Image (cartoon, grey):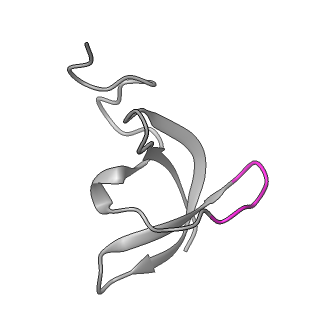
Amino acid sequence: MVDEVEVRTRFCGEWVGGFEVVEQDEQSETVRVRRRSDGTVLPGTFAPHEVRPIGSVGRNRGRRSGRR
């Protein structure tokens, strides 16, 4: 499985592109992602609300909703 996605950063909540799904755990409903630029699989997993397909409708490029 390889789907190009954006992930929500845990530091500031922004969406960042350039990743792809490499593994999906059906039991825990989490995914592992790889950075496309260098092929590194990120440590840890991401929940469904932290990953979205590239080109999602209504996305805010680099901004969180309600940011102050």
- Position of 34 compared to 24: left or right? right
Q: Chief secondary structure of the magenta span?
A: loop
Residue beneath the point at 46% across and 47% down: 7
Quadrant placement of the C terminus: top left
Q: Position of residue 25 (x, y in %)?
A: 39, 81
Q: Position of residue 50 (x, y in %)?
A: 35, 52
Q: Position of residue 8 (x, y in %)?
A: 41, 43
Residue beneath the point at 20% across and 20% down: 66
35 relative to 47, above or below = above
Residue 56 shown in magenta: no
Q: Position of residue 28 (x, y in %)?
A: 30, 80
Residue placed farthest to the right in the image? 38
Residue 40 shown in magenta: yes
Question: Where does the magenta region start and end?
Answer: 36-41
Quadrant placement of the N terminus: bottom right
Residue beneath the point at 27% across and 18% down: 67
**Foreground pick, 44 / 52:** 44
- Position of 51 compared to 6: left or right? left
